[in-house]
Amino acid sequence: MRVGNNMIKICKANLQHLDEMVSLFEAYRVWYRMESNPAAARKFLKERMDNKESEIFLAIDQDTGEAVGFTQLYPIFSSTRMGRVWLLNDLFVAADHRGRGISIQLIDAAKNLARETGAIGISLETEKSNVVGNTLYPRAEFKPQTEENFYFWLAN
């Protein structure tokens, strides 16, 4: 799909993409105020791929061959709905490529994955202060869950 003046291709990532994924993943983590650690990021991503614990889609600029965005999804299950749910845990587009619809293309790839795997849906969370994300997700047909509370226990 052409985005602006560039052709963007969405592909499923594999280990050949590891260097590009580490770069984008680190930019994403830093955006979330985490300390950069490329070695740990490489190990984390490689383990997810080696163990088939996540699905990662990359947005590739066809003109330059550069990876400019990614999304990573993890499989989870709903006992009450008795089905698979994909957790869209990560979505990131490099700053100089934002505003071109690449996030929507990545979300569409995630939706296709959900359909292809017979999942009942996709779940995600974002910070309340994430103005871009909180505008993007409703545009992509995600509905805020107002009937549930989300809790988290931190082990450390």
Image (tube, grey):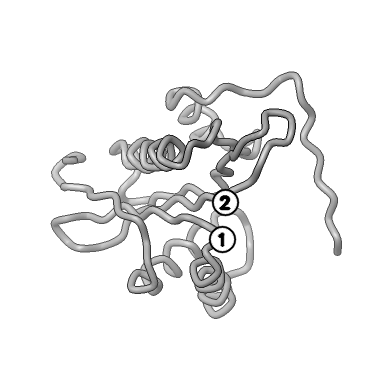
Q: Position of residue 148 (x, y in %)?
A: 76, 25
Whether residue 8 sits left or right of residue 24 in the image: it is left
Q: Position of residue 105 (x, y in %)?
A: 33, 39
Mark 2 = which residue?
74
- Amino acid type indicated by mark 2: Tyr
Along the line of sight, the residue nearer the viewer: 127 or 44: 44
Mark 1 = which residue?
53
Query: Which element carries disc 1, helix, strand or loop?
Result: loop
Whether residue 69 sits left or right of residue 80 in the image: it is left
> Which residue is drawn at the image coordinates 41% and 66% (left, top)?
21
In the image, farthest residue toward the bottom: 39
Along the line of sight, the residue nearer the viewer: 154 or 86: 86
Q: Position of residue 20 (x, y in %)?
A: 36, 68
Q: Position of residue 144 (x, y in %)?
A: 62, 23
Whether residue 66 sits left or right of residue 118 in the image: it is left
Quarter occupied by the N terminus: top left
Examine the rendered structure and indicate whether residue 142 appears above or below residue 93: above
Along the line of sight, the residue nearer the viewer: 88 or 39: 88
**Res. 18 image quadrant:** bottom left
Examine the rendered structure and indicate whether residue 142 appears above or below residue 7: above
Instruction: Assess disc 1: are there few (<14), some (14-19) or many (≥20) residues with their C-alpha within 10 Å of its C-alpha.
Output: few
Instruction: Assess disc 2: are there few (<14), some (14-19) or many (≥20) residues with their C-alpha within 10 Å of its C-alpha.
Output: some
